[in-house]
Image (spheres, grey):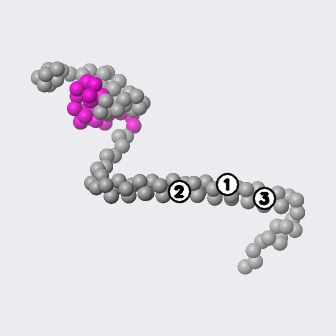
Amino acid sequence: MTSEERRLRRFSEDFRKEQVRLIEAGELTISEVSRLYEVKRDSVRKWVLKYGTKPMPQQFVLHTSSDLNRIKDLEGQVKQLQELIGRLHVEMVVKNELLELAKETLGPDFEKKTKWRS
């Protein structure tokens, strides 16, 4: 297709909405739609902004490889913290269950003996 043919063609609103729906469903990417129909990526992005129901993710530019390494390190730290929170939550649930069992088994005296004195 020549550049003149690309310049003169128009896409219907229904066609654009269908492409946006496919992008939001994860079936196609903006780049794939751009390549498939020989449309500029910016035009497809405008379609997504105009017809989309989900907000477009913010783009960010990595300037150096150290930025990429820093992001990977931070993602690793997030994963470690999520695992730690999960373990601590399980531990807390088990301790609360044991405490309730002790209260049921030992009665009201247990509660009196375990209260903190100020």
What's the magenta region? 33-54
- Viewer can see residue 95: yes
The dominant secondary structure in magenta is helix
Task: Give SS at disc 1.
Answer: helix
Task: Give SS at disc 3.
Answer: helix
Sequence order check, earlier mark of 3 and 2: 2
Snapshot quadrant of residue 103: bottom right
Q: CA distance from mark 1 to mark 2?
A: 16 Å
Residue on which disc 3 sits: 98
Task: Give SS at disc 2.
Answer: helix
Sequence order check, earlier mark of 1 and 2: 2
Image height check: is 76 above or below 54?
below
Snapshot quadrant of residue 48: top left
Q: Nearer the viewer, residue 73 or 93?
A: 73
Which mark is in front, 3 or 2?
2
Q: Residue at x 36, y 43 (%)?
A: 57
Disc assigned to residue 59? none
As shown in the figure, which amino acid type bears the numbered disc 1?
A: Val
Q: CA distance from mark 3 to mark 2?
A: 27 Å
Q: Is residue 103 left or right of residue 79?
A: right
Q: Residue at x 45, y 53 (%)?
A: 75
Residue on which disc 2 sits: 80
Residue 77, given in percent of the width and then of the height, sits at 48, 58
Q: Residue at x 57, y 54 (%)?
A: 83
As shown in the figure, which amino acid type bears the numbered disc 2?
A: Gln
Residue on which disc 1 sits: 90
Snapshot quadrant of residue 92: bottom right
Tell me whether circle 3 and circle 2 mark residues in contact (CB < 8 Å): no
As shown in the figure, which amino acid type bears the numbered disc 3?
A: Leu
